[in-house]
């Protein structure tokens, strides 16, 4: 598996390559737009969809508390949080430490968790998808737009993932000395929410290797669509591409 990961990382398209786009009509069971959808490339924080799936399969208990990982940076102050809070912060604000905390809690630790992510990808027949870490920070987290479309549909089976997609923000109670305050973290999808009647599953991503990415399962005029855009050069380019897909292929609200 290590050898396969290295090889796929080497051939993954750099962020400056043309975008990969996959637009799939779930009602008609057909692709409306297929642009470089089989190009292997880094996927950044879209990885966190698989992280959530594996962590929920391991333990559906959302009330158990875990101490925040210090492996990577976080929007949260260091203390313990419920797994419900960690899932929210990971999926809404794309917090990397929340993802790593869930991975470290897995039997066998972080390494076993990543192995479980890759095993789950195999069970979904995602032949070009490999994971390097739980957060998506590593360039070795790779897939194709078409396979990410399949991952998004698998993620829609999880209530926690669906609920996170519909939140404008998440509020976390924190403690600073004797004073408590509410930390309000805005959804990374918030700029895309007005484009659709409903986002059922949604995750953005950004690294230097991946560029600006987004993967969504959305509802528009009682139809469901999968939208995947990988490798946009700017946030504005990603937004424009999604708006273009809506106006060109999808029915009005």
Image (cartoon, helix red, strand yellow):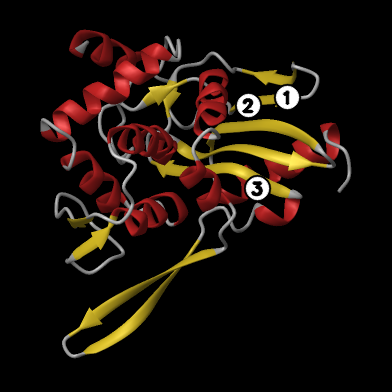
- As drawn, the label of residue 21 is 2
**Of residues 57 and 201, which is closer to you in this image?**
57
Image location (x, y in percent) of residue 24: 70, 24
Mark 1–mark 2 Cα distance, whole angstroms, equals: 16 Å
**Of residues 48 and 228, which is closer to you in this image?**
48
Mark 1–mark 3 Cα distance, whole angstroms, equals: 22 Å
User: Would you say residue 78 is visible in this rendering?
Assistant: yes
Sequence-wise, the earlier of marks 1 and 3 is 1
Contact check, label 3 and label 2, Cβ < 8 Å: no
Sequence-wise, the earlier of marks 1 and 2 is 2
Residue at position x 65%, y 33% from top? 227
- For numbered disc 2, what is the local secondary structure? strand
Query: Please, is residue 9 above or below residue 177 in the view?
Result: above
For disc 3, the neighbor class at 10 Å (few under 14, some 14 to 19, many from 20) is some
In this view, the residue farthest toward the left is 108
Image location (x, y in percent) of residue 57: 34, 32
* Residue 229 location, quadrant: top right
- For numbered disc 1, what is the local secondary structure? loop
Residue at position x 23%, y 45% from top? 100
Contact check, label 1 and label 3, Cβ < 8 Å: no
Sequence-wise, the earlier of marks 3 and 2 is 2
Image location (x, y in percent) of residue 68: 19, 57
- As drawn, the label of residue 26 is 1
Q: Which residue position is annotated with label 3? A: 239
| Left or right position of 174 against 177 | right
């Amino acid at each position: 598996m290590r050898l396969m990961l290295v090889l796929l990382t080497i051939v993954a398209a750099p962020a400056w390559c043309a975008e990969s786009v996959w637009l799939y009509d779930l009602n008609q069971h057909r692709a409306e737009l297929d642009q470089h959808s089989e190009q292997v490339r880094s996927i950044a924080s879209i990885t966190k969809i698989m992280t959530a799936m594996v962590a929920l399969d391991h333990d559906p208990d959302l009330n158990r508390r875990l101490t925040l990982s210090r492996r990577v940076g976080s929007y949260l102050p260091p203390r313990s949080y419920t797994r419900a809070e960690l899932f929210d912060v990971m999926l809404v604000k794309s917090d990397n430490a929340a993802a790593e905390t869930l991975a470290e809690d897995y039997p066998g630790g972080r390494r076993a968790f990543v192995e479980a992510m890759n095993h789950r990808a195999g069970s979904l027949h995602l032949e070009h998808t490999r994971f390097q870490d739980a957060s998506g920070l590593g360039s070795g987290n790779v897939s194709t737009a078409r396979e990410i479309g399949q991952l998004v549909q698998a993620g829609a089976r999880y209530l926690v993932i669906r609920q996170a997609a519909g939140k404008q923000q998440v509020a976390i109670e924190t403690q600073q000395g004797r004073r408590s305050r509410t930390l309000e973290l805005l959804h990374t999808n918030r700029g895309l929410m007005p484009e659709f009647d409903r986002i059922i599953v949604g995750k953005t991503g950004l690294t230097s290797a991946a560029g600006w990415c987004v993967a969504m399962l959305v509802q528009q005029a009682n139809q469901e669509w999968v939208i995947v855009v990988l490798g946009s050069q700017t946030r504005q380019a990603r937004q424009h591409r999604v708006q273009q897909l809506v106006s060109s292929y999808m029915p009005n609200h």
